[in-house]
Amino acid sequence: MTLITRRNLIVLGGAGLVAGCDAVGSSPVGRAVLTRDSDMHHRLQRVIGGRDSLAREYRPEQRSPRFRVNGNANPNTADYNALAAGKFAGWRLKVDGLVARPLSLSLAQLRSLPQRAQITRHDCVEGWSAIGKWQGPQLSKLLDLAGLRDGAQYIVFHCADLMGGSTPYYESIDLIDAFHPQTILAWAMNDAPLPIGHGAPVRLRVERQLGYKHAKFVMRVEAVASLAGIGKGKGGYWEDSSGYEWYAGI
Ligand SMILES: Nc1nc2c(c(=O)[nH]1)N[C@H]1C(S)=C(S)[C@@H](COP(=O)(O)O)O[C@H]1N2
Ligand SMILES: [Mo]
């Protein structure tokens, strides 16, 4: 299976669009193709795929026999270990920030919300892919329960693990992806509770973006107006530390 990179998408999309358009610089698509900034990926992706286009879904027998555990395999902090020892009965997901009704939800409550299951392909920036089944409530359901307040522009996922022992892993997405139907907070993988290595008790699935956006060990979902005050301000651990792009559309 070929990993479709953003670079490929731009080459293919750019060539096709330019060939079919004689006023490249004056159309929105042409401007997107010609603009060499990181925002271009985002806009071009939207122009080609549409805001609500779905990532491909697969049949059960297409699931990968082995799905790699990547990045942190276990937060291994005292707090997390205590929660894991209690099978996450004491875990609560906080939903706060720019919301009308902050939430604190148990795993049982997350499981009792309407669920979505999807079999999708995970593409890591390091060049491997795997197909798995994920289940959980749509993020949109939680955001509707909490009620976004005016000014909310991004949703931030705060994780339990500390990179290098001290820097929290976090990620963020915009509201288009937050309300996308395939954006779920998964507590099950391949019909079993999420294993610790894959992000127990809950991890984000944001199916049209690369693997590093899929925050594991999610503890808190925060609605914000700006990413400036969080971490080093670039919207995610890898964005802050290694220059990974904030919009990692595939
Ligand atoms: N909290 C947290 N989330 C994370 C990571 C991590 O190290 N910590 N690694 C990311 C990367 S780079 C990938 S490819 C996927 C790996 O998910 P998996 O272990 O289920 O394969 O999780 C992402 N989410
Ligand atoms: Mo990754």
Image (spheres, grey):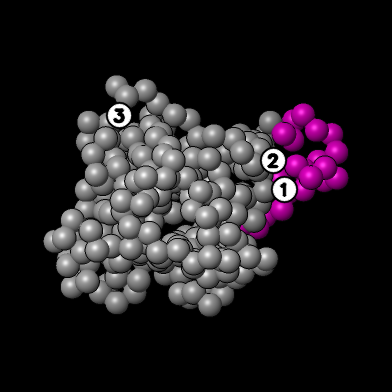
Query: In this picture, is 174 found above or below 28?
Result: below
Q: What kind of residue is marked 2? A: Val
- Residue farthest left in this picture: 85
The residues tagged by marks 3 and 1 sit, at their Cα atoms, a distance apart of 35 Å
Q: What kind of residue is marked 3? A: Arg
Mark 3 vs mark 2: give the one in front.
Answer: 3
The residues tagged by marks 1 and 2 sit, at their Cα atoms, a distance apart of 9 Å
How packed is label 2: few (under 14 Cα within 10 Å), some, or many (20 or more)? some
Q: Earlier in the sequence, mark 3 or mark 1?
A: 1
Disc 1 element = helix
Q: Residue at x 40, y 26 (%)?
A: 58
> Would you identify the image quadrant in which residue 226 lies?
bottom right
Q: Earlier in the sequence, mark 3 or mark 2?
A: 2
Along the horizontal axis of the image, is 111 left or right of 82?
right
Which of the image's four quarters has the N terminus?
top left
Mark 3 vs mark 1: give the one in front.
Answer: 3
Whole-percent x, y for residue 151 in the image: 67, 67
Q: As rendered, which of 218 and 236 lies closer to the eye?
A: 218
Where does the magenta region start and end?
17-38
Please name the residue that numbered disc 3 is placed on.
63
How packed is label 1: few (under 14 Cα within 10 Å), some, or many (20 or more)? many
The residues tagged by marks 3 and 2 sit, at their Cα atoms, a distance apart of 30 Å
Please name the residue that numbered disc 2 is placed on.
47
Q: Earlier in the sequence, mark 1 or mark 2?
A: 1
Please name the residue that numbered disc 1 is placed on.
32
Question: Tag on residue 194?
Answer: none
